[in-house]
Image: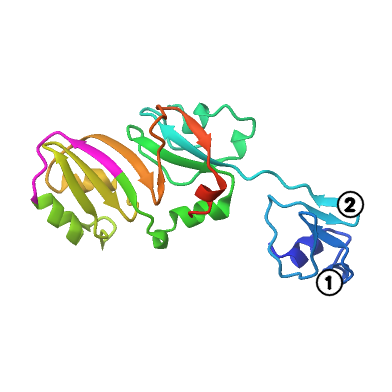
Amino acid sequence: MRLDRFLSNFPEFNRLDARLLLAAGRVRVDGERVTDGRCDIREFQRVELDQRVLQAGKPARYIMLYKPSGHVSATEHPDHPTVLDLLDEPDKHELHLGGRLDLTTTGLLLITNDGQWSRRLTLPGSKQPKVYLVETADPIGGEYVETFARGLYFAFEDLTTLPAQLEILDTRKARLTLHEGRYHQVKRMFGHFRNRVTSLHRESIGPLELDPWMQPGDYRSLTEAEVACF
């Protein structure tokens, strides 16, 4: 929200008051005096008018979680434990997911309280590469590579998937890189060849890889450099 609008939302100030307060240099954001009402204010910032705290701010949270199988990618669910149940954090009720994984899918999941950051992460136009380790019931043929690279038509959405890169690692094991996140996309792509996915694990999102030391259910905060990747 713009700073001038933020100020005018208080009942004692109108828009003219907000402009005058700013022009007089009476408003500080994170300790810095701000006079430009066009400055964007987020819920994580501290805003003060003279000695009065208008918004205390709160810490932004960015978490990497190794999602285990059997946990739902949701904040609450009537039938299954959720990924938030894995967190021992007092503010976890304020967190939401930056994307999702199916119930049985494991691997990298990002959790935050920063809505702008998670939108950048999940918007279709972001095209952040997501890398999955896939195991299948039947052998994976060389024709899969070319088909996935061309893109597959999904009739339900009436669209063709973006080109995907498939690296065959073993007879029934491959690494797949996607640049989008359609509903059950990996399973549907292999389903094109009537080959059932038996195991699916997300290794990375963009430049961010799941830490090799992590076990299912482990989590940690992202570094400032990692947050800035998205």
Q: Which mark is residue 213?
A: none
Q: Residue at x 76, y 61 (%)?
A: 6
Asked whether residue 76 appears in the rendered view, the answer is no
Residue 79's place in the image compared with 173, above or below, is: above
Secondary structure at numbered mark 1: helix
User: Rounded to the nearest whole Å, what is the CA distance between mark 2 and mark 1?
Assistant: 17 Å
Position in image of residue 207 (x %, y %): 40, 50
Position in image of residue 66 (x %, y %): 42, 33
Residue type highlighted by circle 2: Arg
Q: Residue at x 35, y 38 (%)?
A: 102
Q: Quadrant of the N terminus?
A: bottom right
Disc on the earlier residue, 2 or 1:
1
Quarter of the view holding residue 8: bottom right
Q: Which residues are magenta?
A: 132-142
Asked whether residue 204 appears in the rendered view, the answer is yes
Secondary structure at numbered mark 2: strand
Q: Residues within 10 Å of mark 1 (few under 14, many from 20)?
A: some
Residue picked out by circle 1: 19
Residue picked out by circle 2: 52
Quarter of the view holding residue 198: top left
Query: Is 228 situated left or right of 162 in this image?
Result: right
Q: Is residue 22 magenta?
A: no
Q: How is the image coloured?
A: rainbow
**Label 2–label 1 contact, CB within 8 A:** no
Q: Residue at x 88, y 63 (%)?
A: 26
Residue type highlighted by circle 1: Arg
